[in-house]
Amino acid sequence: MKLLDGKAVSARLMEEMAREVETLSVKPCLAVVLVGDDPASRVYVNNKKKGCEKLGIRSLEYTMPKETTQAQLLELIDALNEDKNVHGILVQLPLPKHLDEKTVIRAIRPEKDVDAFHPVNVGKIMIGDFDFLPCTPAGIMELIAESGTDLTGKECVVIGRSNIVGKPMAMLLLHKNATVTICHSKTRDLKEVTRRADVLVAAVGIPNFVTADMVRPGAVVIDVGINRLDDGKLTGDVDFEAVSPIASAITPVPGGVGPMTIAMLMRNTITAAKKQNQ
Ligand code: GUN
């Protein structure tokens, strides 16, 4: 079994990107917007800022109170859209319930949408003509490449159909000529489907959801889950102890997909800055 060490792969990519940033005439700048005080979001935003620091990317943080109105948030996004010194805009999700995520995402200029959540960018991913890749799926593709797997003709099964992970993940695998199945809570005989997978991606949000009997021996297993247990420990969607002996490669949690996501966000920010200064 090969441990797919996202921390190490991410560190390597970050070093490469730091060298690239040094050569750019304009320093890339990422604006991160956080509304409210969700502790998990706070951690994610801090990690994104730390990633920027490591690479010499400027980061601006806008922390807004949870009572912020839709109009106030849209006003900030508009100002960031207009600011030539800002190349990437990221609004941390989830937003407080009274704010409309769809409208907020659409307000970000597609050229600055480093999450690739805007419908224009989602559509571009669908047709395989994209500038930005969605960060988590893009990071997973790097880890699959690291495992040495050629995806052509392989059976890939994604559990979870979210707009952030499941759906774009399926699209990226398809672009690499895999046969892709997306499973979700209404899927019949889930175990029968997941057992077909050469590559199994779990993005469910339930601790230990993927058990050994759901995994084909020799499969590459990617765990996207970040679940915080009552004792404060982080755990993934995969029962790592039981599944790792039968997988050919597997990502740990933490230290697997998470660090890769940040590296891909940095890559998108650099791409955005370069495109806006051509
Ligand atoms: N919340 C959880 N994942 C993400 C992400 O990739 N981007 C943003 N903006 N919010 C998130």
Image (cartoon, grey):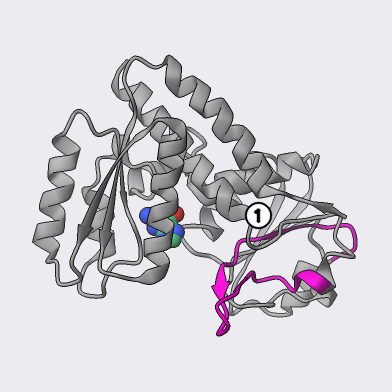
Image coordinates for residue 24, horizontal then vertical, percent:
39, 17
Relative placement, left or right, of 110 versus 83 is: right
> Where is mark 1, residue-wise?
256
Instruction: Tell me what residue is drawn at x 72 percent, y 74 percent.
Output: 210
Q: For numbered disc 1, what is the local secondary structure?
A: loop
Q: Relative to 226, say whether 88 is above or below.
A: above
Image coordinates for residue 269, horizontal then vertical, percent:
39, 35
Q: Which residues are magenta?
A: 216-241
Which quadrant, please, contains the N terminus?
A: bottom right
Q: Is residue 247 visible?
A: yes
Relative placement, left or right, of 148 versus 139 is: right
Image coordinates for residue 114, horizontal then vertical, percent:
38, 41
Magenta span contains residue 236: yes
Instruction: Tell me what residue is drawn at x 37 percent, y 22 percent.
Output: 274
Pick whichever, 215 or 72, lies toward us: 72
Instruction: Tell me what residue is drawn at x 74 percent, y 79 percent.
Output: 189
Instruction: Tell me what residue is drawn at x 44 percent, y 19 percent.
Output: 22
Pick whichever, 222 or 182, lies toward us: 222
Q: Is residue 132 visible?
A: no
Would you call the spot at circle 1 few (<14 residues within 10 Å), some (14-19), or many (20 or more)? many
Q: Relative to 68, say whether 176 is above or below.
A: above
Image coordinates for residue 42, horizontal then vertical, percent:
37, 63
